[in-house]
Image: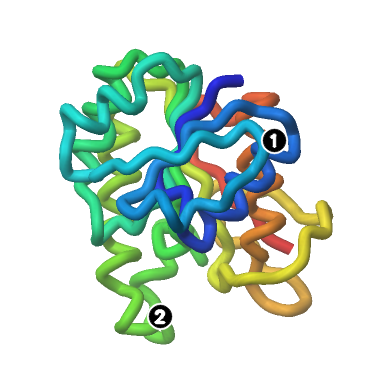
């Protein structure tokens, strides 16, 4: 597939880029500083600004799928969504956050007393992004939330998928960037969560 990846040089984005390249996809990798994007087979690095809707639309045009792997507090969801729609992309996948996942019915993780204050702005912005997608009438979107601990690790290929509830395993709620990338690229290749949020964890 012909895929555009916004935020291709970040922690999650760089792992998703490698997974896409390893599986033989053609990827336009977009970042503010394209020199930080890994040189991989099938990858074309491009400079892009997530606040430049016209420029972003031009970069996204002609792609089957757009993946957004940018921080919520460092972007505008309305600009991103409108650029994807204007570009005519068939699908839009968003690297989500764990804060909006529920720990009990109607209780998002971000509202619990133990949720770190430092992460609240990003978590709340991610929840607003998800709300905007859920109200979207035209776009075929998917929002993939990681587990609470989202960090570098190993590519094992062994993980669980869930819906809106935080996944917790024997070692708590966690997923590596590498295994998250597998779950996201699996969803691109075999779509199973149209206009839905889902989550991945051990």
Q: Give the percent coordinates (x, y) of residue 174.
A: 64, 70
Q: Residue at x 74, y 79 (%)?
A: 171
Picture layout, residue 14 above or below residue 65:
below
Of residues 33 and 13, the one nearer the viewer is 33
Q: Which residue is pictured at 57% across the width and 36% down the height?
A: 43
Q: Residues within 10 Å of mark 2 (few under 14, many from 20)?
A: some
Tag 2 residue = 115
| In the foreground, 20 or 149 | 20
Mark drawn on residue 7: none
Q: How many marks?
A: 2
Query: Could you tell me residue 75's position as x and y percent?
Result: 24, 51
Quarter of the image that includes the C terminus:
bottom right
The location of residue 135, given as percent across then percent down, is 27, 30
- The residue at the point 59 percent across, 45 percent down is 17
For the residues labelled 1 and 2, the Cα–Cα distance comes to 30 Å
Question: Which one is nearer the viewer's eye here, 155 or 134?
Answer: 155
Relative height, residue 16 to residue 137 (above, below):
below
> Relative to 139, does residue 17 appear above or below in the rendering?
below
- Residue drawn at 16 percent across, 38 percent down: 52
Horizontal arrangement in the rendering, residue 96 relative to residue 39 (left or right)? left
Question: Secondary structure under badge 1?
Answer: helix
Tell which tag, 1 or 2, sits nearer the viewer: 1
* Residue 158 can be seen in this image: yes
Eyeballing the image, is 172 above or below 99?
Answer: below
Name the N-terminal-most of marks 1 and 2.
2
| For residue 155, side relative to residue 141 (left or right) | right
* Quarter of the N terminus within the rendering: top right
Left or right, 180 with reference to 103: right
Measured as percent of width and height from the top left, residue 40 is found at 64, 43
Element at badge 2? loop
Question: Label for residue 186?
Answer: 1
């Amino acid at each position: 597939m012909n895929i555009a990846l916004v935020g291709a040089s970040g922690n999650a984005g760089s792992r998703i880029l490698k997974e896409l390249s390893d599986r033989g996809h053609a990827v336009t990798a977009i970042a503010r500083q394209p020199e930080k994007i890994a040189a991989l087979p099938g990858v074309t690095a491009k400079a892009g600004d997530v606040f430049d809707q016209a420029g972003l639309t031009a970069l996204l045009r002609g792609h089957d799928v757009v993946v957004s792997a940018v921080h919520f507090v460092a972007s505008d969801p309305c600009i991103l969504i409108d650029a994807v729609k204007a570009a005519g992309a068939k699908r839009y996948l968003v690297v989500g956050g764990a804060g909006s996942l529920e720990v009990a019915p109607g209780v998002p993780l971000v509202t619990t007393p133990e949720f770190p204050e430092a992460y609240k702005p990003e978590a709340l912005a991610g929840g607003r992004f998800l709300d905007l997608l859920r109200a979207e009438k035209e776009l075929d979107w998917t929002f993939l939330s990681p587990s609470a601990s989202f960090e570098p690790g190993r590519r094992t290929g062994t993980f669980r998928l869930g819906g809106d509830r935080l996944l917790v395993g024997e070692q708590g709620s966690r997923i590596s960037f590498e295994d998250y990338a597998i779950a996201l690229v699996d969803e691109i290749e075999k779509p199973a969560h149209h206009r839905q949020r889902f989550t991945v964890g051990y």
